[in-house]
Every structure is written in structure tokens, then in C-alpha cells.
Amino acid sequence: MQNPQAKKLVEIKNLNLTFNAGKSNATKAIDNISFDIYEGETFGLVGESGSGKTTIGRTILKLYNQDSGTITFNGEDMGSKKKNLKEFRKEAQMIFQDPQASLNGRLRVANIIGEGLDQVGYSKKRSERAEKVLELLKLVGLNKDHASRYPHEFSGGQKQRIGIARALAVEPKFIIADEPISALDVSVQAQVVNLLADLQKKNNLTYLFIAHDLAMVKYISDRIGVMHWGKLVELGTADEVYNHPLHPYTKSLLSAVPEPDPISEKNRVIQPYDASFEKDGQDREMVEVTPGHFVLATPAEAEEYKAAQK
Ligand SMILES: Nc1ncnc2c1ncn2[C@@H]1O[C@H](COP(=O)(O)OP(=O)(O)OP(=O)(O)O)[C@@H](O)[C@H]1O
């Protein structure tokens, strides 16, 4: 269970966002979602493609405006503090899925990272700025020779390291990592995840880690939220969600995770998910089935889920 002393860094309450509202292609990307992210934790957000994970990340960063609901960062409602947006953007950064597309190909690495440093006042101190670039490169496992090169001269994993260094340049408190490893070779995925975990400890960072790979999310996250069709359907500690899943969608996602042991893998049965009940018109809300473990359910379903846990 979450330490009750821990401070909430991000508080999301009853968030709603519909793209193309009122048109035939309207998409309810965020459907009445509430959750908190505690300082120093990694909150993993999982769900299939199109479930709304990226939209939540972008809405937290104020790249999209929600239709209703609130997002509070460090105790401040960002919606009502427009003048603080510049400050907020330094405290909250995003790392993207595609490191190639997210880096300006015309800039040398020193300037890509330097742009972030300029935002926090290094622009007038050239030598300090150069020193800080080297420090950041070292922090993410690169070296000074890399500073004068262009993004296309790097491998995918190295590019992601540059993206991480750029995010860290503004000394953020909070980082949204949106599928940061899914475009990388399997052989370098673990290195980037381990780097993120090390940096979290060193810099006391809080992460929202977005992914569709539940195995990796379990490895890195303290708590996990599972999304389906714009709704949060389950929320709990990584161990609880992984070992005692409640919602049939979570069970189905977990059944798709390959087993490392060849015998278990051979016997693994993928559980299909029949989502039709989500559209039965019944009201569902997040119910706490065991301490800190919530599932989206009607009162009757909640009782069933509870009984199945015993
Ligand atoms: N800018 C946009 N305009 C219109 N619809 C959008 C926009 N961005 C996302 N959507 C739609 O909103 C829904 C949620 O998309 P979102 O990208 O948040 O999902 P996701 O879970 O992050 O998926 P992925 O893993 O593929 O990135 C999808 O149906 C998507 O098509």
C-alpha cells in the first residue's frame, strides 16, 4: 500500500477529454479518470493502442486542454495558473517513443541539450553551459566526443539517451516517459530502463511511465493503472495488479505476457477479452477491493471480484 505520508505530486480528478466533440468522428479519449502520482514513485500506465495513455500524458503537460476535471501539480491547479505554465514546463518533461523524430536533426547534441539549459539560465555563461552539457552526457552514459555530433550519427538507444539528457537539462521533478523503449532493439531496452531507474534515485524524480508491455511496466513501476477505451479499469501496486488482477481486461493483458520459463510458456493460454459488458449502460466506479487496489465495477461486480480474491 502507498505510504500515507507520501506527498501527491500530480492529482488528476474526474478528467474528461473528447476529440472532435460533436462531429461524427468524436472520440472520448479520456473518460472520467482520476488518479494520483506520489512524489518519487513510478506510476505505470498500460493499455492497448488507442486506450488514451498518450492523451493523458499530453493533458497533464497542458499540451491538450481537458473538457472537464482538474489536474493539480505540486498542489497548484495548472488550469487556473496560465501565467505559471512556463515554470511548470521546466518541472515536468516528456520523453518520447521515437527518439529520432523528437530530436532536432539540424542541431548538434551540445545544442539540443543546451536549449534546455538556456531555459534555466545557462545561456549567458558559455563555459558553464558546455560543462553542464558534458555532465549531462556523462549522466546518461555518453561522453564529450558525442557533444559535437548530430542525432543521425547515433543508434536508437543512444538517441534515447540524448532525449533523456535533454529532458533532465531543465532539472525537472516529473517526467512522463511515453513508450520510451518500444522503438528500441530488445537488447538495449533494459539498458534504457535501468538508466531511467538510476536517474530516478539520483535526482529524486517522479515518473509516469506509459507502455503497452505489462512485463516491463511491472519491472519499473511502483503502482500501475490499466486503461481501456479511455477509462481506468484497474489501479494498484505493481505486485497486486500483476499477481492478483481483478478486471477481466487486466487478466487478458496479463495472459498475453510471454513467460520466461519454456514449460509455462508452452502452457500459456491467452484469455480473450469480451468488452461488450462495458457498454451495458450500467454505472461503474472505482471500488477499493483490497487496500490500495481499485477496480472499475458495479456494486455486484465488486462483490464478485472480492469473492474471487478469497
Ligand atoms: N489529436 C487527436 N485528434 C483526434 N483524435 C485523437 C488525437 N489523439 C488521439 N486521438 C484518438 O484518441 C484515442 C486515444 O489515443 P491515444 O494516442 O491517447 O492512445 P494510446 O493509448 O496512447 O495509444 P498508442 O499506444 O497507440 O499511442 C484514440 O482513439 C486516438 O485515435
Image (cartoon, grey):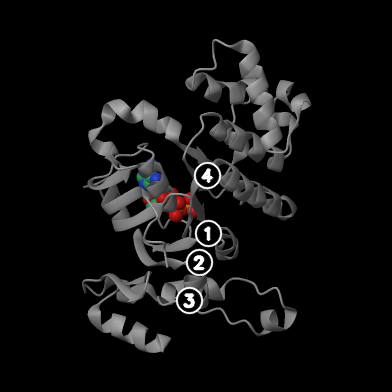
| Amino acid type of the residue that numbered disc 2 sits on in the rendered structure | Ala
Do the CB atoms of the residues marked 1 and 3 lie less than 8 Å apart?
Answer: no
Which-is-in-front pick, marks 4 and 1?
A: 4
- Going by the numbered disc 1, the residue's amino acid type is Ser
- Left or right placement of residue 94 versus residue 280 in this view: right
Asked which secondary structure carries label 4, the reply is loop
Rendered location of residue 105, percent (x, y): 63, 25
Quarter of image, res 125: top right
Marks 4,1: beta carbons within 8 A = no
Q: Earlier in the sequence, mark 1 or mark 3?
A: 1
- Residue beneath label 4, please? 204
Amino acid of disc 3: Lys
Q: Secondary structure at mark 1?
A: loop
Q: Is residue 53 visible?
A: yes
Identity of the amino acid at label 4? Asn
Q: Which residue in the structure is indicated by mark 2?
A: 238
Q: Nearer the viewer, mark 1 or mark 3?
A: 1
Residue bearing mark 3? 251
